[in-house]
Amino acid sequence: MEVDGAKADKEQEFYPVALLVEELRDEDMEKRMHSIRSLGHISQALGQKRTRDELLPFLGEFQDDEDE
């Protein structure tokens, strides 16, 4: 039962991060700006390795999509 509780805690911890990442893709500029202002929180929650390996490439791809 402890494992289920730990998993639920982890999911609750990352839900706001997932929401902010989703806002980066939103058409609403205000939502996008909110997410951009929160990048520090996103990277802190992900940790150094996941930020480097996942978030930064995602942001690069996101920027490339916006340029098109």
Image (spheres, rainbow, N blue to C red):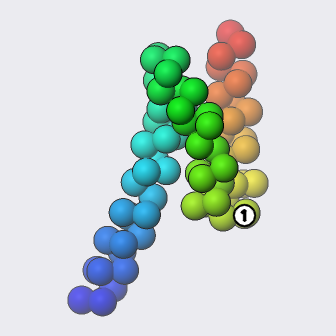
Residue lying furthest left in this view? 1
| Corner quadrant of residue 14 | bottom left
Mark 1 lies on a secondary structure that is helix
- How busy is the neighbourhood of tag 1: few (under 14 within 10 Å), some, or many (20 plus)? few
| Residue 4 falls left or right of residue 17 | left
Residue drawn at point x = 47 percent, y = 32 percent: 23
In the figure, 56 relative to 11: above or below? above
x, y percent for residue 52: 75, 54
Which amino acid does the dot numbered 1 rest on? Lys
In the figure, 4 relative to 59: above or below? below
Residue drawn at point x = 65 percent, y = 16 percent: 66
Q: Which residue is mark 1?
A: 49
x, y percent for residue 18: 46, 47
In the figure, 12 relative to 22: above or below? below
| Residue 60 falls left or right of residue 9 | right
Residue drawn at point x = 70 percent, y = 24 percent: 63
**Is residue 54 visible in this depiction of the protein?**
no
x, y percent for residue 58: 65, 39
Exactly how many numbered labels are in the figure? Answer: 1
x, y percent for residue 2: 30, 89
Residue drawn at point x = 57 percent, y = 27 percent: 33
In the figure, 43 relative to 11: above or below? above
Query: For the N terminus, which image quadrant?
Result: bottom left
Query: For the C terminus, which image quadrant?
Result: top right
Residue lying furthest top in this view? 68
**Is residue 61 visible in this depiction of the protein?**
yes
| Corner quadrant of residue 9 | bottom left
